[in-house]
Amino acid sequence: MTGALLFVAVLLLVGVILRLRVPLFRWLYIPASVIAGIVGLTLVQASGTLSRRLSSSASLPAGGGQLITAQAEQLDAILQSWTGVLGQWPSFLIAVVFAGMLLERKPVPIRDSISQVGRQGLMVWIIVLGQTALGLLATWLLVQPFYDVPNSVGMLIETGFAGGHGTAAAMGKVYASEVIDFDAGLDLGILMATCGLVYGVITGILWINLAIRWGWIAAPASTATGKRAEPATEMPIGHAKIGSETIDPLLLQIIWLALAVAVGMAIQSGVAVAAGTIDNVIGNRSGGSDEQQVLASRLSATAVLDFPLFIYTLFGGLIVRMALRWAGQERAVDRDTINRLTSTAMDVLVVAAITSLNLAAVASLIVPFSILFVFGAVWSGVCLLVIARVVLPPAYWFPLG
């Protein structure tokens, strides 16, 4: 655990340095966490490849060659053990991210929500539903005739494009559930999120430059004048909601977030107990043929109500916020600090998910993945250039799109 944590810290530091020093990364707006994850994945794969080649090589000298091989194997074993630990992090870290979603937000009146984000919300739903529909259609027509994959593989477009690494980590738990039983879903989702991010940034920069030239949007002041834009003012991590002589203000926000996660875990345990009770009351389903037993298992209350932890921590954050409001202490929650804490969890999640990516699982399904990626890329262009013009406000269709 300690070694894996230090490994992630070093990778993030390397990612920050590369992000600041390499102009291409700055131009593409690639997050340091993604760079760090790719560096980690490269190190892990290179270590394994080197270890296997040295072990199978017969041309190495007897003394020094054996020492080098042993050291390479030891390094590979250490990296593999760290990778194994990192592979377990995304499921918990995404629960932390979801716990902060409703914890750091004040409930907005429905009337205000509809009036403020009506068209934008409609556009998002069109994008998401289109990605889902096209993904399922492509899976049915082009993938399943040649590959034995579940229907839910079609959700990979929405997972990677509209979602991202957090959604991929969340969906990974869904894919690995007993109902779907598709362990490669996590790795494919993380890869789709990474490719979707890079594709979105590159094509976004392309479309923005073309839009300025074609008059769809005005050029930024820094571009028009040739002057460099002033850097954004540094913001504090948050605002103290309690005197530091009582408890550190940052620690107080960590406590609220931890409580939200704890409430979610408690709800999950309660639902599991209730589901088990329901199954016991209904009776033993172990009789019948193998097919009947599998069907009965999948239709049991335990299987149907077996939601990932992040679903429950989402409600946990809402419950903690409502409890604080009821106690008259809602102001004790600092939105900026909670947002920073969940962003930190997301950065670590991205590094852990990419570094522990199972390339063997991805390689065996690279053709279905490529088909879905192409469909997602084309649909993104259609949404921006065609649908956004109709759905979004005419004066701002391109920036919002």
Image (spheres, rainbow, N blue to C red):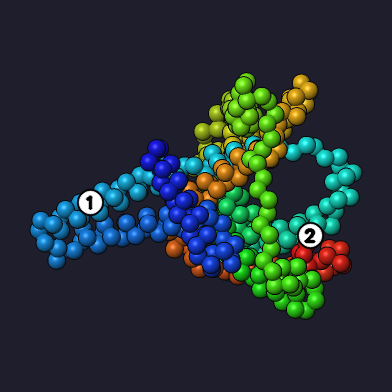
**Which three-letter amino acid code belongs to the residue tagged 1?**
Gln
Seen from the viewer's position, the closer of residues 294 and 97 is: 97
User: Is residue 260 something that shows in the picture?
Assistant: no
Looking at the rendered image, the disc whose residue lies closer to the viewer, 2 or 1, is 1
- N-term mark: 2 or 1: 1
Q: Could you tell me the amino acid type at mark 2? A: Met
Task: Give neighbour class at mark 1: few <14, some 14-19, many 20+ (Cα, 10 Å).
Answer: few
Q: In the rendering, at what x and y percent does residue 51 appear?
A: 26, 57
Above or below, comparing residue 290 to residue 31 in the picture? above
Question: Label 2, on which residue?
Answer: 123
View extreme (left): residue: 62
Q: Residue at x 35, y 48 (%)?
A: 80
Quarter of image, res 236: top right
Q: Residue furthest bottom?
A: 214
Whether residue 232 is visible, yes or no, is yes
Question: Which disc number belongs to residue 389?
Answer: none
> What residue do we see at 37% from left, 57% from top?
43
Q: Tell me the residue at 55%/32% (across/down).
A: 285
All told, the count of numbered labels is 2
Q: Is residue 318 above or below residue 169?
A: above
Viewport quadrant of the C terminus: bottom right
Please give left or right for residue 13 compared with residue 241 in the image: left
Q: Is residue 194 above or below residue 353?
A: below
Q: Position of residue 291 (x, y in %)?
A: 52, 45
- Badge 1 is on which residue? 71
Residue at disc 1, secondary structure: helix
Residue 76 appears left or right of 346: left
